[in-house]
Amino acid sequence: MTDVLRYEPDRFTVEAGQTVRFVISNTGQAVHEFYVGDEAAQQEHEAEMREMGMQHDEEIGISVNPGQTETLEVTFEEATESLVGCHEPGHYAGGMRATITVES
Ligand SMILES: [Cu+2]
């Protein structure tokens, strides 16, 4: 995750039923999030963040401080298109998102 509001890489392909361990490094100076979910989930979390900020790390999302590395394990049950988004103020709108293709 970088301060130019990008994930590198910004595209992941996984298999349905697979549990993936993401090792997430924040190489920027700002806090960034790695929040997994479809567009509806991203919008919901965006609204939540606007109201009260991230209260705690969740099953499907993690907040990473500058210079830190965290891991997040996610199991993808069904073949679908999913997203990763950062919902620090302005980041998602600024394009801080990645796509996850879950193949059957
Ligand atoms: Cu961010």
Image (tube, rainbow, N blue to C red):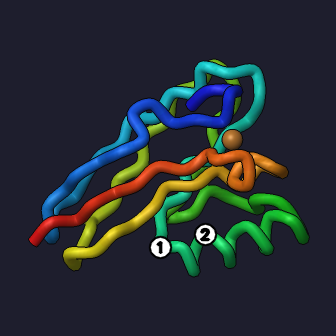
| Image location of residue 83, percent across then percent down | 45, 61
> Residue sitting at 55 percent across and 57 percent down?
35
Which quadrant of the structure image shows residue 18?
bottom left
Of residue 65 and residue 40, the one placed in the foreground of this image is: 40
Q: Which mark is residue 62?
A: none
Q: Which residue is identified by label 2?
A: 42
Pointer 1: residues within 10 angstroms few (<14), some, or many (20+)? some
| Image location of residue 87, percent across then percent down | 71, 55
Q: Relative to 24, is 44 on the left or the right? A: right
Of residue 34 and residue 68, the one placed in the foreground of this image is: 34
Instruction: Locate the C terminus by quadrant.
Output: bottom left
Q: Secondary structure at mark 2?
A: helix
Q: Which mark is residue 38?
A: 1
> Residue sitting at 14 percent across and 61 percent down?
15
Amino acid type of the residue that numbered disc 2 sits on in the rendered structure: Gln
Q: In this rendering, is residue 88 above or below 27? A: below
Q: Relative to 75, is 15 on the left or the right? A: left
Q: In this rendering, is residue 26 above or below 41? A: above
Asked whether the beta carbons under mark 2 and mark 1 sit within 8 Å of each other, the answer is: yes
Of residue 99 and residue 78, the one placed in the foreground of this image is: 99
Instruction: Locate the N terminus by quadrant.
Output: top right
Mark pair 2, 1: CA separation = 6 Å
Which quadrant of the structure image shows residue 11?
top left
